Image (cartoon, rainbow, N blue to C red):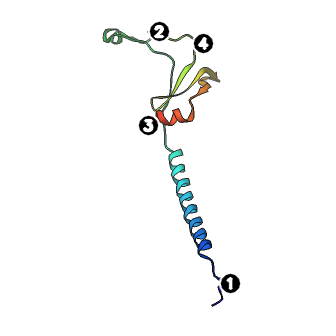
């Protein structure tokens, strides 16, 4: 047997570890794609107020509810009920939108999603 055509143990291990690391990388890519397609509820909080049950029961169509925030204050953007960013309300044609002014740090976003 000609030993010049054989791989050393180190070369063999490197080849095997590369395949397993590539396989792990592919598995991670697939998992990441699954997570990136996961639907999340995004909501915007314009402000808050407190009411009694009696006040709530007396609401009628056309009632104006006063909120605790000023017109030029940032609105909160929430993902699954957790704070994510702050922005300002804008109009886009006939609809409302939110222009983001600040976004939580990635570490804070991950912690809030737990």
Q: Position of residue 82 (x, y in %)?
A: 46, 29
Earlier in the chain: of badge 4 and badge 3, it is: 4
Secondary structure of the residue carrying tag 4 is loop
In this rendering, the label closer to the viewer, 1 or 4: 1
Residue under label 1, please give it.
4
Whole-angstrom CA distance, mark 4 to mark 3, is 31 Å
Earlier in the chain: of badge 3 and badge 2, it is: 2
Q: Position of residue 64 (x, y in %)?
A: 46, 9
Q: Is residue 81 left or right of residue 11?
A: left
Location of the N terminus by quadrant is bottom right
Residue under label 3, please give it.
114
Residue drawn at (53%, 59%) of the image: 24
Earlier in the chain: of badge 1 and badge 4, it is: 1
Whole-angstrom CA distance, mark 1 to mark 4, is 77 Å
Whole-angstrom CA distance, mark 2 to mark 4, is 15 Å
Residue under label 4, please give it.
72
- Nearer to us in this view, 14 or 56: 14
Q: Is residue 87 above or below residue 50?
A: below
């Amino acid at each position: 047997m000609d030993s010049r055509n054989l791989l050393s143990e180190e070369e063999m291990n490197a080849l095997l570890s590369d395949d397993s690391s590539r396989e792990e990388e592919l598995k991670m890519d697939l998992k990441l794609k699954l997570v990136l397609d996961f639907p999340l509820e995004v909501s915007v909080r314009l402000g808050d107020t407190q009411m009694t049950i009696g006040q709530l029961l007396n609401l009628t169509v056309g009632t104006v509810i006063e909120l605790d925030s000023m017109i030029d204050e940032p609105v909160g953007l929430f993902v699954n009920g957790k704070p994510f960013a702050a922005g300002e309300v804008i109009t886009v044609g006939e609809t409302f939108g939110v222009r983001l002014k600040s976004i939580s740090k990635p570490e804070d976003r991950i912690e809030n999603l737990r």
